Image: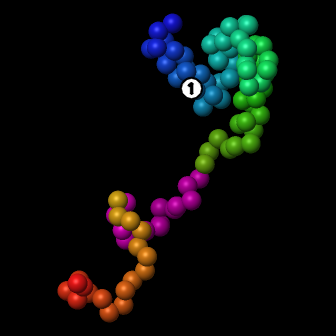
Amino acid sequence: MTAHDAGALVRRMQECFNTREFDQADDLFTPDFFSHPLGTTGFGAGKRLWHGLVAHFPTTVSSPRTSSSTTTESPSAPPSRGSRSGTTASSRC
């Protein structure tokens, strides 16, 4: 197996997880696959773990920011720490 093949395999496994198509991942593992973290042989235990993981997280995530929120600073500017009253650009040293 080449590095390209291994990368494609990992991307396919991630795609199966992210799309929740766990049965599609069966073809990616050999019957004698051994999961060291789970201490089991075969992908069945891994698939059960995937089901358990996604049960704890929703499939959609709402953004904490709404479209009505505004910001006065550019994204690359550091956050402001408050204003300096009475200070102008011409009076700074």
In the image, 23: left or right of 78?
A: right
Residue 44 in the image: state x and y as whole percent.
Answer: 77, 18
The residue depicted at 55 percent of the width and 21 percent of the height is 10
Q: Which residue is mark 1?
A: 15
Residue 80 in the image: state x and y as whole percent.
Answer: 41, 73
Quarter of the figure with residue 42? top right
In the image, 28: left or right of 6?
A: right
Choose between 23 and 1: the one closer to the eye.
Answer: 1
Amino acid type assigned to the residue bearing label 1 in the image: Glu
**Figure label count:** 1
Magenta segment, prevailing SS (helix, strand or loop): loop
Residue 46 in the image: state x and y as whole percent.
Answer: 74, 23
Q: Mark yes or no: residue 71 visible.
A: no
Q: Mark yes or no: residue 36 visible.
A: yes
Q: Is residue 3 above or below residue 54?
A: above
Query: According to the image, what is the colour scheme of the structure?
Result: rainbow
Outermost residue toward the bottom in this view = 86
Q: What stretch of residues is rendered in magenta?
A: 62-75
Q: Is residue 37 above or below residue 30?
A: below
Membership of 9 in magenta stretch: no
Disc 1: CA contacts within 10 A as few (<14), some (14-19) or many (>=20): some
Quadrant containing the C terminus in the rendered view: bottom left
